[in-house]
Amino acid sequence: MTILETGLLSVGCTEQADMNLITLLALTKERHNRLCPRQVLGVRMGLFAVRLLNLSSPILDKRLLVILETDGCFADGIEVATGCSIGHRTLRVEDYGKAAGTFVDTLTGETIRLVPEADVREKALLYSRTTQSRYQAQLQGYQVMPDESLFKVQIVQLKKTHQEIIGEAGRRVLCTGCGEEIMNKREISEGREVYCRSCWGEGYYQSGV
């Protein structure tokens, strides 16, 4: 099976960078048994962000915090490119329905937000080798387009510090309201009492009774 048959290309960058991209795309493809344009965007965005922050991929420590604005296959691409994950507490999802991500260097505090350019689908047609469909054109085009044509870069500031977002590992308290354990300094304090977000009225569910 050729690279083109798998949906993976190897043109447009240096040979070493190409092989890294191909390897990462293969890894994210394994999670879905197929490769889609959003997975490619996730991998490309993750690699670009790491390069902009002068880090090396994958991040094996907790130097990088990633906050994504959607979940799904795009997030899988980000994970394999950066090494960040929910399990390592280095990846968060704030679901705004956007294929965007904010990347925080937790050592320097440098914070950037990347989002695909508004006309990225149309641009992809110019870089694709296929006319089979717009989907295939995007799948191939996203792999070889220059980073600057794919993404808009913003320097941003978090409304909370990255330390507050990550929380305090190992901290445990019991909610005054429901008695359930709250970890990682996610409680809300009122005087000497502490509450979980659900008891405080910020929960995503309500009792079915």
Image (cartoon, rainbow, N blue to C red):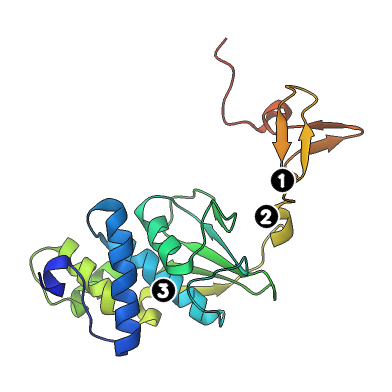
Q: Nearer the viewer, residue 207 or 96?
A: 207
Task: Tell me which amino acid carries mark 2.
Answer: Ile
Circle 1: element type = loop
Residue 107 pos. (x, y %): 69, 73
Which mark sits nearer the N-terminus, 1 or 2?
Answer: 2
Label 2, on which residue?
166
Task: Tell me which amino acid carries mark 3.
Answer: Phe
Q: Residue furthest right?
A: 191
User: In the displayed structure, does residue 129 sit left or right of residue 156?
Assistant: left
Label 1, on which residue?
184
Residue displayed at 28% across by 72% down = 142
Which mark sits nearer the N-terminus, 3 or 1?
Answer: 3
Q: Nearer the viewer, residue 90 or 93?
A: 90
Residue 200 pos. (x, y %): 73, 29
Give the number of the mark in front: 3 or 1: 1
Task: Tell me which amino acid carries mark 1.
Answer: Asn
Which mark sits nearer the N-terminus, 3 or 2?
Answer: 3
For the N terminus, which image quadrant? bottom left
Label 3, on which residue?
151
User: In the displayed structure, does residue 53 sit left or right of residue 8?
Assistant: right
Q: Real-space Cα distance between discs 3 and 1?
A: 34 Å
Q: Real-space Cα distance between discs 1 and 2?
A: 8 Å
Residue displayed at 38% across by 68% down = 43
